[in-house]
Amino acid sequence: MWVASEDSGAPTATVGIWIDAGSRFENEKNNGVAHFLEHMAFKGTKKRSQIDLELEVENLGAHLNAYTSREQTVYYAKCFSKDLETAVEILADINQNSLLREPEIERERGVILREMQEVETNLQEVVFDHLHATAFKNSPLGRTILGPVENIKTINREDLLNYISTHYKGSRMVLAAAGGVEHEHLVSLADKYFGKLSPSHDEGLSFAKCSFTGGEIRVRDNGMPLAHMALAVEGAGWTDPSNIALMVANTLIGSYDRSVGPNMASMLGQECAQFNLCHSFQSFNTCYTDTGLWGMYFVVEEDQVEAMLRSVQAEWLRLCTNITDEEVTRSRNHLLANMLLMLDGSTPICEDIGRQMLCYRRRIPPPELQARIEAVDAKVLKETCMKFIFDKKPALAAVGPIDQLPDYATICSQMYQFPPKK
């Protein structure tokens, strides 16, 4: 097991377990089991009932939570520094000794089904699930984290136990902590409470490579007031040297919200404000181990669907050919500032430690991060964007009144054809 921490001397701390296991490690039949298991972790162990666990956490003034992503499952606790050992012991207990009893499984099955209904009302989540489905067709990355309804209705105790025995290995876990934490003490707690974990890591369990396929999913609903769309190309994996340049490009495009006003640092934001192209947009750079999605999510009125899409693609082509050093310098500064400002408090620092230890097997120190960002100049950015964007087959997901949306062949052609100047 990997143990990593940062000691700030604060009176509080965040400690958690980052596990190299998420929905990407599932197959078609058990898709949803990782998220189901995360829900079951708080439903009682051999030592504590669910009520006992909740009361103990509340009596400590602590906070216990968990989440599942496509590649990771995380359990973490926020507590007073003096209660660090208790928090580690609770995390170890729920991960190694959960009872997973049938009554709780049936009860949680209903909770997850209701959660799925709530997700279906969040159009951004719906669009991003469609985007993954078309970007990585017929592969684990193309499936949802929650899984299909039919799987949730049939997942049983044996499925949960099989997932634990297969993936919850010591060598696939990171015990991370930040705040008032003494590292040697944390190492001793890891040995004390996680010492019985199986250390083996069967390389045969590594996930299969998910190929980016591109394509489109359109869900036409003219009864909706606005169209919600996402367009993306294949991005870089966590360890790809191009990732930093793509992050700078992502920051350069930026975001826009009509209710907030124009983002003067974003040329696309200025254009959207001037021509009333959309209600909002945000660029994104989603990374996985060996691939990623780099693109744009935007919300637009029906009569501006085609104009907004063309403006997005024109801006992408501008990244490939006509970016100034001044724009790149500003974006580098914004990116570095945003990344450092996000590390405000023990929880985001702990998250940074856990994620980086799983992705890189080390934590990148701020001076190295700054040097890598500053190495991206206009020439590097244009070369990177040419490699990842120019004449590449995109993935498109669109929901709502999208009658104006051009056909897919036209959208592909706009990945290399420059539009006429306004």
Image: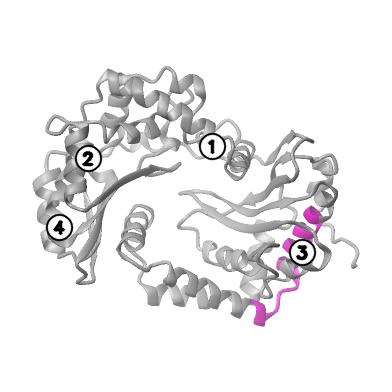
- Left or right of residue 227: residue 102: left
Question: Which residue range is magenta in the image?
Answer: 308-327
Residue drawn at point x = 27 percent, y = 35 percent: 41
Q: Which residue is mark 2?
A: 54
Amino acid type of the residue that numbered disc 4 sits on in the rendered structure? Leu
Q: Earlier in the sequence, mark 4 or mark 3?
A: 4
Which residue is disc 3 drawn over? 272
Which residue corresponds to the image point at 22% horizontal and 33% vertical from the top-left?
50
Which residue has dot 1 on it? Answer: 119
**Tag 4, which secondary structure?**
helix
Sequence-earlier tag: 4 or 1:
1
Looking at the figure, which quarter contains the C terminus? Answer: bottom right
Q: Earlier in the sequence, mark 3 or mark 1?
A: 1
Q: Which residue is mark 4?
A: 186
Q: How far apart are the alpha carbons under marks 4 and 1?
A: 37 Å
The answer to whether the residues at label 1 and label 2 have Cβ atoms under 8 Å apart is no
Query: Distance of mark 1 from mark 2, alpha carbons?
Result: 26 Å
Of labels 3 and 2, earlier in sequence is 2
318 in the magenta segment: yes
In the image, which is nearer the foreground, mark 4 or mark 3?
A: 3
Q: CA distance from mark 3 to mark 1?
A: 28 Å
Q: Of the residues under marks 4 and 2, which one precedes in the sequence?
A: 2
Mark 4 near mark 2, Cβ–Cβ under 8 Å? no
Disc 2 is placed on an element classified as helix
